[in-house]
Image (cartoon, rainbow, N blue to C red):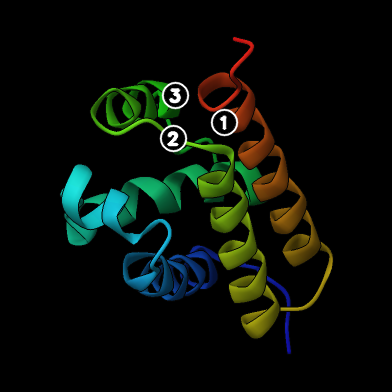
Amino acid sequence: MRDIETRIDIEKLMTAFYDKAFADDVIGYYFTDVAHLNLEKHLPVIVNFWETILLKSNNYHNNAMEAHRHIHSLSPFKAEHFQRWVKIFTETTDELFRGDVAENAKLKATSVGSAMTLIFANPNT
């Protein structure tokens, strides 16, 4: 297996991840029933996000927190939702890639999940 090296690699990872996430019995409804996510439209945006983080492309200029804040207002997130998201992300990465960038992707996903948990699913905030 090779490492994540290009935007096409990130597209492959995100497509595989969202295939699993949409079908997941814990978080799938956020994509299908709450956000009504149009993956064809969303995929380039999320690829920009991960390409910026992993390959330093500077292609992402949106506010990820705002989009999630809106979804949270419709159906509140819980810690287990972010834990599941990280688990699926990590498993998908491991199935497709090996290397430093793939390891960094998993670390960044864990950081994103932790930050989202603190912001949205922490009863003390």
Name the residue at the right extreme: 100
The answer for how far apart the CA atoms under marks 3 and 2 are is: 13 Å
Percent from the top left, x then y, of residue 30?
30, 49
Which is nearer the eye, 2 or 103? Answer: 103
Can residue 7 be seen here? The reply is yes
Q: In which quarter of the image is residue 96?
A: bottom right
Q: In this view, does 42 lie to the left or right of 81?
A: left
Q: Say which of 84 and 42 sits in front.
A: 84
Q: Which residue lies furthest to the top in this view?
A: 125
The CA distance from mark 3 to mark 1 is 8 Å
Identify residue type, mark 1: Met
Q: Which disc is residue 65 wearing?
A: 3
Q: Residue 116 carries which label?
A: 1
CA neighbours of label 2 inside 10 A, class few (<14), some (14 to 19), many (20+): many
Residue 62 appears in view = no
Binning the other alpha carbons within 10 Å of mark 3 as few (below 14), some (14 to 19) or many (20 upward) gives few
